[in-house]
Amino acid sequence: MVSDWRAYVAPGKRETVQQQIVSVLTALKPNAPAAVLQKLPGMAKRIEESLFAAATNEADFTNEATLQTRIMQIQQSNANRLLKRPSPSAAAQARGRRLSDEQSKLLFAYLQAWRNKTVQEEGIGPWDVVPTHILAQVATTCPRSILELEQCCPSDHHWIQKYGSSLLLTIVQFEAKLPKQHASSSSSMGPPEKRAKVASPRKPPSPRQPRTLKKQIAIKPGMPPPSPSISSLFPVPPPYNGGLFPSSTDPSTNGLTSFLRKSSPKLTPAMQPIMPRVEAPATSYPPLAPPKPTADATVAEDEVTRLRAMLVQVQQENLQLHGEVAYLRQQLRQQQANEAAACQALVACQTANVAPAPARPKSTVAKPFA
């Protein structure tokens, strides 16, 4: 049987394979901190057990030339298994996945690179930053805010306060590098060349029926239409009779004042509108349809989400800077108080060292009377 060879493998060979795995992992992570190097023997033992179970024979198991390739395959299979796990949060499941399977794999590798950089900067283990299974959940759900990040991993929140903003910024940078997806309507219509042909078909002119070019007749500019005279707009004033105007009390004889008293004079044909205004009821117009979501709206929503994540990071940095400024102000005030107390003590010491001048005794000799 094929599985009988595992019972005859010597323990020394398995230990040799474990040492080879430690050497491969050390070569893959040359700048790993001491906390990671201490965990390498345990990691090598687990990888050796997986290789022992997946090998077809003893020669395949002990082959050092293919050891690194088999280790990478095991890591890739573990990553795929973690990415296929459903999210434990009901809110994340209801929201659905925002990335495809290939994009989730790319995001998982992107987040692992971010975690490795943090590990090298702080000298800690990757499990102290973000555990691998939580990193896979983040790559699957692709959160865009602190609230969604907490919903993604409801059982473990201790790392979000320290690394949450940096993780969200990394996700925003990854989404910015993704190619923009076109709208489904444009893809369903076919290539642009075919759309252009269908949208605007043009018939070539027939050789038997040549086009007749219409001659443009030059129109001579004529005189503009006569404008209405001022006499048609205003009434004619009464004539001047003997140096006296008619009395203002007689409205029939004073046409000018009667015109001014009118609130709305009748418009002449030249001042009347061409077409009368028809007041239609508001119910005669059909209701406006709600706007349909387009690709531009989706891109704008993604941009707003990215800006919100950056705003959260800027707010946290602002709070940190305010705290540092308050601390420095407190230190400065304390230093000024200490210097003032030292000056007062020095002045008091110098004042105590100066003795007061002795008082002059009164003379007892009696002055003679003048």
Image (cartoon, helix red, strand yellow):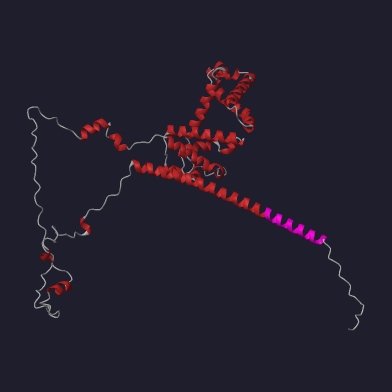
Q: Report whether 280 appears left or right of 168.
A: left
Relative depth, front residue between 288 and 196: 196
Q: Single out the residue that lies furthest toward the front.
A: 370
Q: How many marks?
A: 0
In the picture, residue 96 is in which quadrant?
top left
Q: Height in image: 182 above or below 14?
A: below
Q: Is residue 164 something one can see in this rendering?
A: yes
Q: Residue 61 appears at what percent x and percent y? A: 56, 19
Residue occupying the far right of the picture: 365
Q: Which residues are magenta?
A: 335-353
Q: Quadrant of the C terminus?
A: bottom right
Residue, x 63% and y 29% (percent of image)? 37
159 relative to 105, above or below: below
Image location (x, y in percent) of residue 30: 60, 27
* Residue 273 found in image quarter: bottom left
Q: Is residue 339 magenta?
A: yes
Given residues 167 and 38, the one toward you in this image is: 167
- On the picture, is 35 further left or further right than 114? right
Residue 54: tell me if it is visible. Answer: no
Q: Looking at the image, which is closer to me, 279 or 222? A: 222
13 lies left or right of 284: right
Residue, x 73% and y 57% (percent of image)?
343
Identity of the residue furthest to the top in this view? 59
Q: Indicate the position of residue 125 as horizontal and vertical percent values.
A: 60, 35
Residue 359 in the image: x percent, y percent? 86, 70
- 353 in relation to 318, above or below: below
Outermost residue toward the bottom in this view: 369
Residue ID at (43%, 35%): 177
Q: Main secondary structure of the magenta part?
A: helix
Q: Is residue 367 magenta?
A: no
